[in-house]
Image (spheres, rainbow, N blue to C red):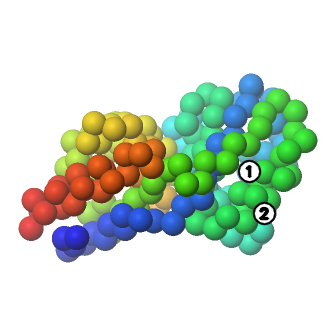
Amino acid sequence: MVKPPGLEVETDAPLHAATLRYFEPTGPFADAVAAVTGTPLPAPLKATVVPAEAVDGAGLLLAWLRPTETLALSEEAAPLAALKERLSGAEGGYVVELSGGLGAFRLRGSRVAELLSGFGSTALALGLNQARRGRLADVQVLAIGTSTDEALLVVDRAYAEHLRGWIEATLADWT
């Protein structure tokens, strides 16, 4: 893959995923998530990093998907297993394992914003701790701003290879 200066694209970022589905974003399930993770569910269009010590000593990212659904992501399986176990009896919601069903692309460097803009999707213009859905290469993508110079693109696994090729073609134009 072409690697333009100031930009690194990891097209097979390790990813374990689950979705938290609930009836009320402020109901008993949301309270249980906050008790387990030490942080509330993310607000609309936001993402939240859960402290590593809250769920088995590994990083966990919660990203808003829609009013009654939050995506939980980790590079390791243990935090999601712990979250699922601890929330198994919580009223008003449930955890659905998605690992293997999603693909992830990590963008790093000083030119991440430029790259996202170059993709042509203004819906994915990101700031820190934002989670936005938009279309890239004619497929639905969730973009998460994880730091000022890093973004994570999450896509249904069925479209990951297509998006990978599209990203590589876009990067080739940058040289």
Which kind of residue does numbered mark 1 sit on?
Thr
Q: Is 160 above or below relative to 11?
A: above
Q: Is residue 113 left or right of residue 155?
A: left
Task: Please name the residue shown 77% across and 68% down the image.
Answer: 56
Q: State if disc 1 and disc 2 touch (CB < 8 Å).
A: yes
Q: Visible in this render: residue 41?
A: no
Q: Earlier in the sequence, mark 2 or mark 1?
A: 1
Q: Nearer the viewer, mark 2 or mark 1?
A: 2
Answer with the quarter of the image where residue 65 lies.
top right
The image quarter containing residue 83 is bottom right
Q: Quadrant of the N terminus?
A: bottom left
Outermost residue, top direction?
A: 23
Residue beneath label 2, please?
54
Residue type at the position of mark 2: Ala
Q: Is residue 31 above or below residue 146?
A: above
**Taking the image as drawn, is residue 31 in sight?**
yes
Q: Which residue is mark 1?
A: 39
Q: Position of residue 95 (x, y in %)?
A: 73, 43
